[in-house]
Amino acid sequence: MKKFARWIVGAALPALFLAAACRDDALVESGHQAEGTVPPTANISVTLTPEGAATAHIKIGPAAIRTLARRITAAGELGFNARRLVHLTARTPGRVERVLVVRGDRVREGQVLAEIYCPDYMTLQAEYLLAAERVKRQAGDPADAAQARALLDSSRERLLLLGASPAEVDGLGALSAPRPFLLVRATLSGTALEASVLAGDWVELGANLFRLADLSTLWASLHIQEKDLSSMKAGAEAVLRSQAYPGEDFRGRLVLVGDVVDAGTRTVEGRIEVPNPSGKLKPGMYVDASIAAVGERAVIAVPEAAIQDDEGRSIVFVRTGERTFTRREVTAGERFAGYVEILKGLTEGETVVTSGGFLLKSELRNVGLEDEHGHD
């Protein structure tokens, strides 16, 4: 015979749960209605009084078919965008006269970073001026003019390769003498990661001067599990999260899925390019990435709030009457967009509790205690 337990939820809410907590007939027949406690897998029903239903603020929602867009998670680390990282070196020997930027400074493209006194630069300017004068003198002779123009163009190209700007070369004709200082300019807008020289240093050809990085976009290097490779495709949308900014999402794109599996970790390199206009993200930060996987499928799903944990088991409360709710153990699958896939335990169309389930679960524990006392 079924056993019914009636209870009151606290002194502040008298008679709100004149509840019937009853085990399924099948459970009774199988002997699960043992003395002492309510079996954790039992499907127990709770019937609320009208007053209890109004006070408990129970909210419900359907177990419905939804499209599951799978996502793959991977850990990674932020680094520089190698396509927006430059290393400036000395293009000719010389003495550093002035350094206008130090490590950490923000720079803009074309900004002067340093001035270097370069004898070779002065020599090339003088050659350019002589070639320009020869072009003027040979203007009336087509054969000589062509040769003079070729020499001028060659001198111009050598000055540009040395680091002079087109405007600086074109303006030489207005000067009475060559410029003594070669200007080192930023080739992109960003941050000076390194400034390797001081005023007065003598630098040789190829000496390190500055290292610049544009941090407005970064790369996140990931370790993609071998089992997830079939679900990964370059171009997929990705979301990054960092412990530095809890709850904040940084959106980017998967731009690379590597071609080689690491023999030790059984992972493949993945690369996400993420915009960083605010500068919040820093190279070296650890991040967790969630990447949209290839393919979609239809699944039965319920809102995340419907799932309750009961001693390590996932349960939901199914509405089985106007004010009656039955505990049901379920097997949960993937979580996506605020929903949980249900692999086992529910059918499409069943109505589950999405708010108030914790209260129902607490009352069921009280039922088990009352049953136990009743057998004493």
Image (cartoon, rainbow, N blue to C red):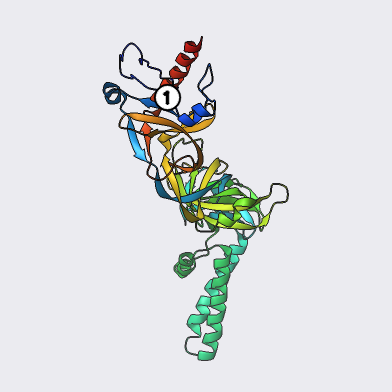
Q: Residue 277, relative to residue 39: is it above or below?
A: below
Residue 353: percent from left, percent from top: 37, 33
* Displayed quadrant of residue 118: bottom right
- Among all residues in the image, which is located at the extreme front? 1
Residue 249: percent from left, percent from top: 44, 43
Regarding residue 208, the answer to whether it shows in the image is yes
- Number of marks present in the image shown: 1
Amino acid identity at mark 1: Cys
Q: Nearer the viewer, residue 32 or 11?
A: 32
* Displayed quadrant of residue 360: top left
Q: Nearer the viewer, residue 239 or 131?
A: 239
Residue 184: percent from left, percent from top: 54, 56
Say left or right for 88 vs 314.
right
Q: Which residue is identified by label 1?
A: 22
Regarding residue 337, the answer to whether it shows in the image is no
Q: Residue 358, relative to residue 68: is it above or below?
A: above
Check the picture and name the quadrant holding the N terminus: top left
Residue 126: percent from left, percent from top: 56, 69
Q: Residue 183, relative to residue 19: is it above or below?
A: below
Q: Residue at x 56, y 71 (%)?
A: 157
Q: How many other residues sit within 10 Å of disc 1, few (<14), some (14-19) or many (≥20)?
A: many
Q: Residue 258, relative to residue 147: is it above or below?
A: above
Q: Nearer the viewer, residue 372 or 290?
A: 372
Is label 1 in a helix, a strand or a loop?
Answer: strand
- Among all residues in the image, which is located at the extreme right? 263
